[in-house]
Image: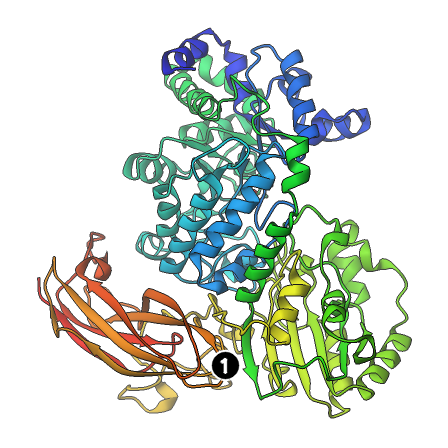
């Protein structure tokens, strides 16, 4: 329809029809099973009329399911305005890719864009119109369970990935190929106090603008069509009711004209926050804060009518919200084709195709980070290998956001190893449960049926020891349970489950070479395990092709190239620990004070166990001849930083060369380093490549003392290296 037709449609709609467009419900409300409907309906206290006329549906998947729901809805609804179908396609639809924190470790934006495009196509043919992704929340606290959904601790890197995800999902918005992206969670959800889920976020506007907001801006610059609010407070006001954040920053300052959707029940939660006395005030606050869709509550449905009939300004806001929703539906062509893209036959051809699996396998192998290797990896198929630990056989490799827990599709480590090794060279024994049995009941309850089966702990330990004794090398497949991360998955401790620590010690006592393959949704605290393993790989939750991707690296088909996008703490006591910290007035080194009176711990180092940007290879890379083209930079000009990188080892490999800059003095304190660029290069043995970076004045801008975004004259240090602990720098002066 043309714009005028949309405006005419809006004029024809009754107030109730307008309000219902602002309501989003999950598929359960449209189930044939009356019991399923009455449960949620009672809980929400929402009317049949509202249910029959909502504007969008949450997390219904499948071409048949979405087509049927759309058909029934259009038959029954009053205004006959097609539904939007939205879902959480976080790291893949049915072909599940590594969790975003793993994708972040690839430092390969083009690859991540390709993975997002696959996820979009599988979703589009399944009738999804919008994905609630990318999640671009910056994270510095691995206690928070949702670090698994983030691409990490760096603003620049997260902004690069935000663009990749959005461009991959949306492409040219082709029917059956692309879906609209909804960037979330606006804003700064990744900084809850104590790393505790849904907890208070409180930081200066400067800190928010400098570190937390740019990645949302990058997603919007890439064309993201929707934004989702976050659960947390921003300067004492919950994001979902925060006019400054949503009207002043998002709409006016950034010019965002698309849909702002609340997170799940977040409008109702304005009452729990204590910012709204009742649902009516919550509805008013959210609409004034430009929230266009109320996800999964009846607050808008039951309260907006009495608000808008007595307040013409609120009636205008209602019309603005309805118009945004109608415009997205129109842009997606739903008025002409309410079944956009949903195609059962195409879905059969596209979903989990060989090509999609091949891409997923590549993303896995590039996401793995080699943390330690004392000449044990890569393994050979002639070796007798004991594959021990709960992840030796577990199919739960996809993280907490993969709806398709059809685990038969997942390639396990055991399956992948059996494709490489002759049967007599592979001995498999889980050895223990993933987590302590009491944790299953306490923390996971109904979400965690899988391991409630009886497990013969003693017997399984004996089998594991037996397998290890017969082997040349032990590969221990260990890690946290997927429900120990993700939403609601905050942890106060970051260590491996105790049952696994016991198993590792028992196997270690046999004195065999040991490789650790660690599955997790976060940086874990691995200082106790580090000395026990000859080699250590962190593999995140690698998804459908997890077994294959890991085996490709373990057996040397792929030389690992992953680099951490989030620091691994030495201890949870250091958290938050991140590379781009401030120097403080009493830095541990270069301070004039005695060591005791410097910024340090008395019982542990300041540095993380593994820093941002860290990752080993099966070969080695040397850096030399680092230089700058100039020692002075004037605005409009550029300095070229060059370095020669050599593959000084015996096998080909890929290195991510990283550029960091430090602003030595500013009108506010500046980080000791900031990532400003990177290049991922492939080198044959003994090959040398000159790598160049251009440094411009724009790269040196920040939010100054006056909160203006600009650079300041002065001295800067440039670093180029293989991780954020690179020490050797060269200085230049910016002269404005
Ligand atoms: C959840 C999450 C959000 C998700 C939404 C819909 O609570 O916070 O990321 O998109 O609800 O499932």
The answer to which quarter of the image holds residue 695 is bottom left
- Say how many tags the image has: 1
Q: Residue at x 43, y 50 (%)?
A: 164
Q: Residue at x 64, y 76 (%)?
A: 555
Q: Residue at x 74, y 85 (%)?
A: 505
Local crowd size for mark 1, using a 10 Å CA cut-off: few (<14), some (14–19), many (≥20): some
Q: Is ligand 1 within 8 Å of the beta carbon of the residue shown at mark 1?
A: no
Q: Is residue 166 left or right of residue 464?
A: left
Residue 436 place in picture, x, y as percent: 78, 68
**Label 1 SS:** loop
User: Which residue is nearer to you in this view: 329 or 20?
Assistant: 329
Q: Is residue 614 visible?
A: no
Ligand 1 shown in quarter: top right
Residue 158 place in picture, x, y as percent: 41, 56
Q: Is residue 461 left or right of residue 620?
A: right
- The outermost residue toward the top is 12
- The quadrant of the rendering that contains the N terminus is top left
Residue 82 place in picture, x, y as percent: 56, 19
Q: Is residue 16 left or right of residue 548?
A: left
Q: Is residue 569 visible?
A: yes
User: Which residue is nearer to you in this view: 682 or 315?
Assistant: 682
User: Which residue is nearer to you in this view: 418 or 488?
Assistant: 418
Q: Is residue 520 above or below residue 161?
A: below
Residue 265 place in picture, x, y as percent: 58, 36
Q: Is residue 83 above or below residue 162?
A: above
- The quadrant of the rendering that contains the C terminus is bottom left
Q: How is the image coloured?
A: rainbow
What residue would you read off at disc 1? 651
């Amino acid at each position: 329809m043309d714009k005028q037709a949309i405006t005419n449609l809006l004029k024809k709609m009754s107030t109730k029809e307008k309000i219902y467009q602002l309501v989003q419900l999950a598929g359960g409300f449209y189930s044939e099973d009356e019991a399923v409907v009455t449960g949620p309906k009672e809980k929400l206290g929402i009317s049949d009329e509202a249910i029959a006329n909502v504007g969008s549906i949450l997390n219904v998947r499948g071409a048949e399911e979405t087509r049927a729901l759309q058909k029934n809805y259009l038959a029954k609804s009053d205004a006959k305005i097609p539904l939007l179908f939205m879902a959480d396609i976080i790291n893949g639809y049915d072909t599940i890719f590594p969790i975003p924190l793993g994708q972040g470790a690839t430092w390969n934006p083009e690859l991540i864009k390709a993975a997002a495009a696959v996820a979009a196509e599988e979703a589009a043919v399944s009738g999804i119109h919008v994905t609630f992704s990318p999640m671009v929340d910056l994270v510095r606290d691995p206690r928070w369970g949702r670090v698994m959904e983030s691409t990490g601790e760096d603003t620049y890197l997260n902004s690069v990935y935000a663009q990749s995800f959005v461009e991959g999902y949306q492409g040219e918005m082709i029917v059956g190929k692309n879906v609209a992206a909804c960037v979330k969670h606006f804003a700064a959800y990744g900084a809850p106090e104590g790393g505790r889920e849904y907890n208070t976020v409180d930081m200066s506007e400067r800190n928010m603008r400098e570190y937390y907001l740019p990645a949302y801006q990058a997603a919007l610059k890439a064309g993201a069509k929707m934004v989702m609010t976050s659960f947390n407070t921003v300067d004492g006001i919950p994001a979902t009711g925060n006019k400054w954040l949503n009207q002043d920053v998002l709409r006016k300052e950034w010019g965002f004209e698309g849909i702002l959707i609340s997170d799940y029940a977040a409008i109702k939660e304005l009452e729990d926050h204590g910012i709204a006395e009742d649902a009516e005030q919550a509805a008013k606050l959210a609409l004034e804060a430009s929230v266009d869709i109320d996800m999964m509550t009846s607050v808008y449905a039951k309260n907006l009518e009495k608000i808008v009939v007595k307040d013409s300004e609120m009636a205008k806001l209602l019309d603005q919200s309805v118009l945004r929703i109608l415009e997205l539906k129109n842009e997606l062509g739903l008025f002409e084709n309410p079944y956009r893209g949903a195609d059962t036959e195409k879905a059969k051809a596209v979903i989990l195709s060989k090509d999609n699996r091949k891409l997923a396998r590549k993303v896995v192998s590039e996401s793995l980070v080699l943390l330690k290797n004392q000449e044990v990896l890569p393994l050979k198929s002639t070796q007798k290998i004991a594959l021990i630990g709960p992840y030796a056989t577990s199919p739960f490799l996809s993280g907490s956001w993969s709806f398709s827990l059809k685990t038969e599709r997942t390639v396990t480590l055991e399956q992948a190893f059996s494709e490489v090794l002759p049967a007599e060279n592979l001995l498999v024994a889980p050895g223990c449960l993933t987590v302590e049995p009491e944790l299953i009941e306490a923390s996971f309850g109904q979400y965690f049926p899988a391991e409630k089966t009886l497990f013969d702990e003693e017997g399984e330990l004996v089998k594991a020891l037996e397998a290890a004794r017969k082997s040349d090398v032990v590969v221990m497949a260990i890690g946290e349970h997927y429900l120990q991360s993700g939403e609601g998955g905050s942890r106060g401790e970051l260590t491996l489950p105790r049952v696994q620590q016991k198993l590792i010690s028992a196997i270690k006592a046999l004195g065999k070479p040991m490789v650790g393959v660690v599955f997790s949704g976060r940086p874990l605290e691995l200082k106790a395990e580090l000395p026990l393993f000859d080699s250590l790989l962190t593999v995140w939750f690698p998804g459908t092709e997890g077994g294959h991707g890991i085996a490709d690296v373990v057996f040397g088909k792929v030389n690992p190239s992953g680099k951490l996008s989030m620091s691994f703490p030495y201890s949870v006591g250091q958290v938050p620990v991140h590379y781009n910290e401030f120097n403080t007035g009493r830095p541990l080194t270069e301070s004039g004070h005695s060591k005791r009176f410097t910024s340090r711990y008395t019982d542990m180092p300041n540095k993380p166990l593994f820093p941002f940007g860290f990752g080993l290879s099966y070969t080695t890379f040397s850096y030399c001849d680092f230089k700058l083209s100039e020692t002075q930079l004037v605005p409009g000009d550029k300095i070229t930083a060059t370095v020669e990188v050599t593959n000084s080892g015996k096998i080909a490999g890929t290195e991510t060369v990283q550029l960091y800059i430090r602003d030595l003095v500013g009108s506010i304190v500046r980080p000791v380093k900031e990532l400003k660029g990177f290049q991922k290069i492939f080198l044959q043995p003994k090959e040398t490549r000159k790598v160049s970076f251009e440094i411009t004045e724009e790269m040196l801008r920040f939010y100054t003392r006056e909160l203006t975004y600009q650079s300041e004259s002065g001295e800067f240090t440039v670093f180029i290296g293989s991780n954020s602990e690179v020490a050797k720098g060269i200085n230049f002066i910016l002269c404005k």
